[in-house]
Image: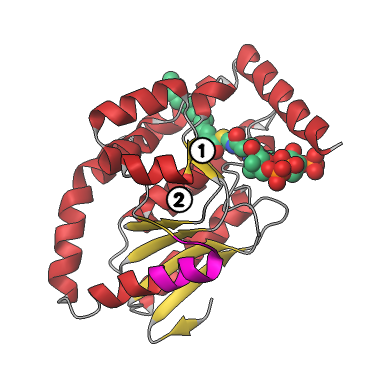
Amino acid sequence: MPLKMGVATVTMNRPPVNSLNTEHLETLHRTFIRLENEKCRGMILTSSSPTVFSAGLDIREMYKPELEKARKFWRTLQDMWLKLYSSPYPTVAAINGHAPAGGCLLSLSCEYRVIVPKVRMGLNETQLGIVAPQWFQDCMRNAIGEREAEKALIAGRMFSSEEALKVGLVDEIAQNKEECIQKAEAFLASQANLPMLARKTVKLGFRHQTLSRLLTGREADTKIFIDYIFQPKVQKGLEMYLQSLSKKAA
Ligand SMILES: CC/C=C\C/C=C\CCC/C=C/CC(=O)SCCNC(=O)CCNC(=O)[C@H](O)C(C)(C)COP(=O)(O)OP(=O)(O)OC[C@H]1O[C@@H](n2cnc3c(N)ncnc32)[C@H](O)[C@@H]1OP(=O)(O)O
């Protein structure tokens, strides 16, 4: 995590697709805590993969899990998200590859998004027979508005880079990763002279409702997750989805 002029670039590096298992989520969470403690001036979140930003939650964490491990997985996801979404420093996602589901959530949790061409992002959970939790949905709604979010979430729509720009899911398209990082740095530079306390207070004001909805209902949210994924038909769906992903690789 290099810090250049107080700006950190956090590069996810969990091959092959940066899927988010408990360990990877813990690493991200620890990183965001450290950045806050070190009074970082801005953060760029990106990926070491040339084609994938993040494939979202690691489906193997939800497929036939042990109960306590599944609980820990979900709580760690909540912890990571609460830290990122409420970060006092400015955040940009340099989306240099596909960003489905939890990958899209990561980018939506940043303040500004730059994407490369010819990749897809969105909350596709419905298409997998699972449901994007309320706080995932809130992040989408906060980015693109009620009507577009409702349509996208019901359909589990994956947006092309161009569609994402058009609907406001991302702020800019860059031609490649290098330009993506340059544009991310330019956004952070544009924020650098703003009084930090005022900036942070306004940001948290906008995000307060979404944050408190989860903060006041964390246990209930965990229970919803557990009850949902332990349903036999959901497990069957996850099994089939994992098989389809593996078949694709074969
Ligand atoms: C009332 C109820 C309310 C709420 C319910 C509560 C909770 C339910 C939980 C809801 C939340 C879900 C959020 C999620 O994030 S779910 C994950 C969704 N992710 C995806 O759908 C992405 C799947 N992956 C892909 O589409 C492609 O892999 C991708 C486009 C990212 C990259 O394609 P590429 O061709 O480069 O790679 P692949 O060959 O497909 O994959 C390589 C190997 O990686 C494995 N893989 C891919 N994605 C995942 C993943 N998300 N988890 C685990 N493993 C993954 C894939 O199987 C390949 O593995 P091998 O076959 O090589 O072993």
Residue 175 forms part of the magenta stretch? yes
- Tell me how far mark 1 sits from mark 2, CA to CA: 9 Å
Residue at screen point 45% across, 29% down:
132
Q: Quadrant of ligand 1?
A: top right
Q: Residues within 10 Å of mark 1 (few under 14, many from 20)?
A: many
Residue 120 forms part of the magenta stretch? no
The dot on residue 101 is: 1
Where residue 202 sits in the image (x, y, percent)? 14, 59
Residue at screen point 54% across, 63% down:
176
Badge 2 marks a residue whose secondary structure is helix
The dot on residue 10 is: none
Residue at screen point 51% across, 56% down:
116
In this rendered view, identify the residue nearer to me: 234 or 250.
250
- Kind of residue indicated by mark 2: Leu
Q: Relative to 151, does residue 193 appear above or below in the rendering?
A: below
**Residue 123 can be seen, yes or no:** yes
Where residue 186 sits in the image (x, y, percent)? 34, 74
Which residue is label 2 attached to? 106
From the viewer's perspective, tell me whether residue 185 is left or right of residue 148: right
In this rendered view, identify the residue nearer to me: 199 or 120.
120
What's the magenta region? 174-183
Disc 1 CB within 8 Å of nearest ligand 1 atom: yes
The N terminus - image quarter = bottom right
Mark 2 and mark 1 in contact (Cβ < 8 Å)?
A: no
- Kind of residue indicated by mark 1: Ala
User: Please, which residue is most extreme toward the top here?
Assistant: 233
Where residue 190 sits in the image (x, y, percent)? 25, 74
From the viewer's perspective, tell me whether residue 2 is left or right of residue 162: right
